[in-house]
Image (spheres, rainbow, N blue to C red):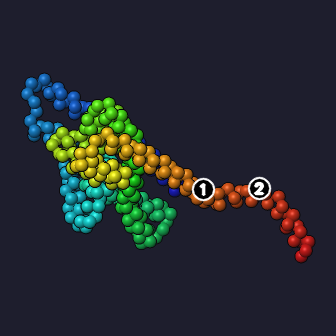
């Protein structure tokens, strides 16, 4: 009971500290914006770069660059394959919370330290000897080191699923816009302005790259590399082939939107066929034991009395 009270009190204290820190950050950010808009002391001249740098907090000026350099130095000892895979996963996940590679490595380190220290404190509170507690804490730290990887994989799969689900409706809207007389880039931008999801943000990025001078085929290939969704890859391949052969974009969009709706219906039917198999586990372990207890429960005393008379 005392261990549970200690754990609850520590969680409550951590939550209160995080809330106070968040309120302080928001107020401090508003103060910095106000100071930049209105010069200090009514001065008419803008502040120099040194004054801007010195006005930042100690954490931003000193600690944050120090930890970034420390993580960069630690990243040199990480295998190049792991670094490239993490960069790829961050790209496919859409860089959640604007995380860079160094930020994600810092998150992994922080997770390992928190999980390891928490496990060690919990084991010591249960009066486990020092060496076994340290070994279990090191194992927990290794688990905590890979927890952000599992979270990143879930975010990547969720983003890819969201893009695949939004593609048929987006293709229908693209077809309507092109039929109304808009160009392909204007139709992409129109869809991106009307909707706000992972796919439309990729459409907006494609249009931005085209406006910056990137060829349409290259911009569409970049979208495929940033998503790795088979439906999007098929759609882009057909668009590039039609552009090279001189086929009208309207006919391509009509056929692609119809195929996307067909694939969505087939995917829904596939999930419906998987439902009985997924329901089997809760039925066997949760529903059937309760049913047997209700049906056979009243007969158990009679069976016990019958076998007791026989003996």
Rendered view: 133 above or below 96: below
The residue nearer to you, when weighing 42 against 98, is: 98
Residue hosting label 2: 294
Q: Earlier in the sequence, mark 1 or mark 2?
A: 1
- Left or right of 95? Residue 309 is right
User: Are there few (<14), some (14-19), or many (20+) residues within 10 Å of tag 2?
Assistant: few
- Residue 17 lies left or right of residue 27; in this view the side is right
The one nearer the camera, 280 or 101, is 280
**Secondary-structure class at tag 1:** helix
Quadrant into which the N terminus falls: bottom right
- Residue 216 figure quarter: top left
Residue 134 to residue 239: above or below: below
Occupied quadrant, residue 254 = top left
Disc marking residue 31: none
Given residues 160 and 252, the one toward you in this image is 252
- Local SS, label 2: helix
Q: Mark 1 or mark 2, which is nearer to you? A: 1
Q: Residues within 10 Å of mark 1 (few under 14, many from 20)?
A: few
- For residue 95, above or below residue 303: above
Specify whether residue 189 is in view.
Answer: no
Residue 36 lies in quadrant? top left
The residue wearing badge 1 is 276
Residue at far bottom of view: 311
Give the residue drawn at x 19%, y 56%: 69
Q: Residue at 36%, 61% (x, y): give it.
A: 145
| Percent position of residue 58, x then y | 21, 45
* Mark 1–mark 2 CB contact (< 8 Å): no
């Amino acid at each position: 009971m005392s261990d549970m009270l200690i754990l609850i009190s520590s969680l409550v204290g951590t939550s209160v500290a995080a809330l106070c820190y968040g309120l302080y950050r928001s107020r401090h950010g508003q103060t910095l914006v106000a100071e930049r808009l209105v010069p200090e002391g009514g001065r008419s001249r803008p502040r120099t770069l040194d004054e801007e740098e010195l006005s930042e907090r100690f954490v931003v000026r000193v600690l944050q660059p120090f930890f970034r350099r420390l993580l960069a130095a630690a990243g040199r000892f990480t295998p190049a394959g792991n670094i490239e895979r993490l960069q790829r996963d961050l790209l496919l996940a859409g860089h959640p919370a604007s995380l860079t590679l160094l930020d994600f490595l810092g998150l992994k380190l922080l997770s390992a330290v928190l999980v390891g220290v928490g496990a060690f404190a919990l084991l010591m509170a249960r009066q486990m000897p020092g060496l076994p507690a340290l070994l279990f804490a090191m194992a927990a730290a290794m688990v905590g080191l890979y927890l952000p990887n599992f979270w990143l994989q879930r975010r990547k799969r969720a983003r890819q699923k969201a893009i695949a689900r939004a593609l048929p409706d987006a293709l229908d809207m693209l077809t309507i816009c092109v039929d109304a007389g808009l160009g392909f880039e204007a139709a992409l931008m129109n869809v991106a302005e009307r909707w706000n999801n992972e796919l439309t943000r990729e459409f907006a990025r494609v249009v931005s790259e085209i406006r910056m001078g990137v060829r349409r085929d290259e911009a569409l290939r970049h979208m495929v590399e940033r998503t790795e969704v088979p439906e999007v890859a098929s759609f882009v391949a057909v668009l590039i082939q039609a552009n090279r052969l001189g086929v009208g974009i309207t006919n391509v969009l009509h056929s692609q939107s119809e195929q996307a709706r067909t694939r969505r219906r087939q995917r829904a039917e596939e999930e419906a066929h998987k439902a009985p198999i997924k329901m089997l586990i809760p039925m066997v372990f949760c529903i059937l034991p309760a049913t047997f207890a209700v049906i056979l429960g009243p007969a158990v005393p009679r069976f016990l009395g019958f076998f007791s008379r026989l003996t």
